[in-house]
Amino acid sequence: MAHLGSGRRRLLAVPIGLALTASLGVLPAMTASAATLDGVAATASDYTGPKLSYVVNLERTGPGTAKQVTKAIEAVGGTVVHAYEQIGVIVAHSQNPDFAKQIRAAKGVTSAGATRTAPLSPVQTTEEGSTQVLTADEAAKAAAEAAPGQEPLEPNQWDLRKIKADEAHAINLGSSKVTVGVIDTGVDDTHPDLAPNFSKEQSANCVGGVADQTDGAWRPYADGSDHGTHVAGTIAAARNGVGISGVAPGVKVAGIKVSEPGTSLFFTEAVVCGFVFAAEHNIQVTNNSYYVDPWYFNCKDDDDQKALVEAIGRATKYAERKGTLNVASAGNSNWDLAGESIVDTTSPDDATPVTRTIDPRKCLDLPTQLPGVVSVSATGDQGLRSYYSSYGLGVIDVAGPGGDKWQVPDTPDKNGRVLSTLPGGGYGYKQGTSMAGPHVAGVAALIKSKHPNFTPAQVQAALKAEADEMACPDKVYDATGALVDATATCKSYGTQTGYYGAGLINALRAVKW
């Protein structure tokens, strides 16, 4: 699922000086007496603990529903950043170490929790399967082999041919009335392959939990990731005689930036903002190639994590009700998301991780395991599940080309990763479920282009119906490139498998559907 580079980001564990309790940092004591909801109200300045961000989920939704809870938030030393009354979620900040516990007791609140475990400090991140930049020699070799009607670099796009997107384009390039929102690290709208299809009016920076549509706010940070731009190119790079082609080169693409500056961390308040923004700006499909930090899995028996699940679940459901289909990557940890247990050694990733064993049927990977979200696994050129891709019977809906360095295609570059756009006008290769997701989002956009009145549920049903059914393989590649037995890990039920869901998406069948 993303992140980054290889599809799902893996971050270096960087201690930042706070010892952890079960889910919150051990914070400095308050300077004034503890606030209560009944006594004299405290103010935010009465507390000297590190400032954390919270989501507060309300019992009711609609105009005016946040008024009472806003007063309660202020009474226990919090400040409201933004109230999403349409889904009953308030984003708040507080330096009160007991803020979450106290606000949970307030009338009208169903749950509340910190969106992080410690004040954010910029950290150096690493990207699994980091970008391989396309060289001038590689580009020239591809262009020399391009057939009439192909984009210059299209000979290297094995992934388009794998899902018959090149054949689909002869029938339908996609409609400019359909927009795919890339909820990610930002999109470079100045790239010559993206500029023709980019929608500024439907783009924003949601970091912090409030949408900022200032011109260029949606672009990657100057020292930031190329991930969102790569994802955008796979979806909607134009057929304009430049570079590559996207899966749906006639649709619009928008950038919704949700990653923190100096990091590749995606916190709940930004993700909630992203889904609500997409819902209210006529975005028909969102692509989500990430997991929501700081927890790889969010367990409902933890008060903080429970609140994050509820807030993001409300946001995705709201988007669906407004006509948006949400597509998400399943992750790059080679985990069975339908299994009985997973040992997570990566969480929380905004401080020092602790090892914990979780049940993925009860502790959710967000947003890919939320109801209604299309969960995508990754395949390589040979059609086998990519060695890194997570999987799970009943979890994975469909599969898409994510790349696999061990599955080498017969292309000019012989590179099994996925070629797409990079900030600054360049091109490069990445592999991961982050790359599989945008292929599915692109095909969903083609379906929506042909059937503009389809609901998100109908688009999802069409994605599954047009997919090429794939049986469990006998063997798959492992991380070392060795072929290993797959019969013990790939489970099936009817035509569904844990590796591929309903199968590998088919763009040609989608435009004929």
Image (cartoon, grey):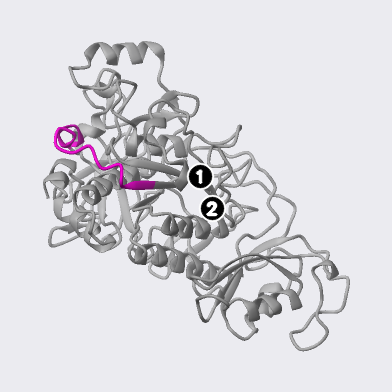
Q: Foreground residue, 490 or 370?
A: 370
Which contiguous range is marked in magenta?
A: 164-180
Look at label 1 and name its amino acid. Answer: Arg
Please tell me in which quadrant of the rendered image residue 494 appears.
bottom left
Give residue 443's mark.
Answer: none
SS of the residue under disc 2: loop
Apparent side of residue 222 relative to residue 337 in the rendered image (left or right)? right
The residue carrying mark 2 is 346
Q: Local crowd at mark 2 within 10 Å, few (<14), some, or many (≥20)?
A: many
- SS assignment for the magenta stretch, majority: loop
Image depth: mark 2 or mark 1 in front: 1
Dot 1 lies on which element?
loop
Decide: is 106 above or below 244. Answer: below
Left or right: 2 with respect to 393? right
For this rendering, which residue is in front, 18 or 411?
A: 411
| Whether label 2 touches label 1, CB < 8 Å | yes
* Residue 374 % position (x, y): 31, 57
Q: CA distance from mark 2 to mark 1?
A: 8 Å
The percent coordinates of residue 206 (x first, y second) are 55, 51
The numbered dot on residue 10 is 1
Residue shown at the point (21%, 43%) measured from the top left: 475
Residue 421 occupies quadrant: top left
Residue 99 spot, x, y in % from top left: 71, 73
Q: Is residue 267 left or right of residue 53?
A: left
- Residue sitting at x 48%, y 61%: 297
The answer to whether 175 is drawn above or below residue 226 in the figure is below
The image position of residue 405, as x and y in percent, is 33, 31
Q: Amino acid at mark 2?
A: Thr
Is tag 2's residue or tag 1's residue first in the polypeptide sequence?
1
The answer, for residue 66, to whether it is visible in the render is yes
The verdict on residue 306 being magenta is no
Q: Is residue 197 above or below residue 28?
A: above
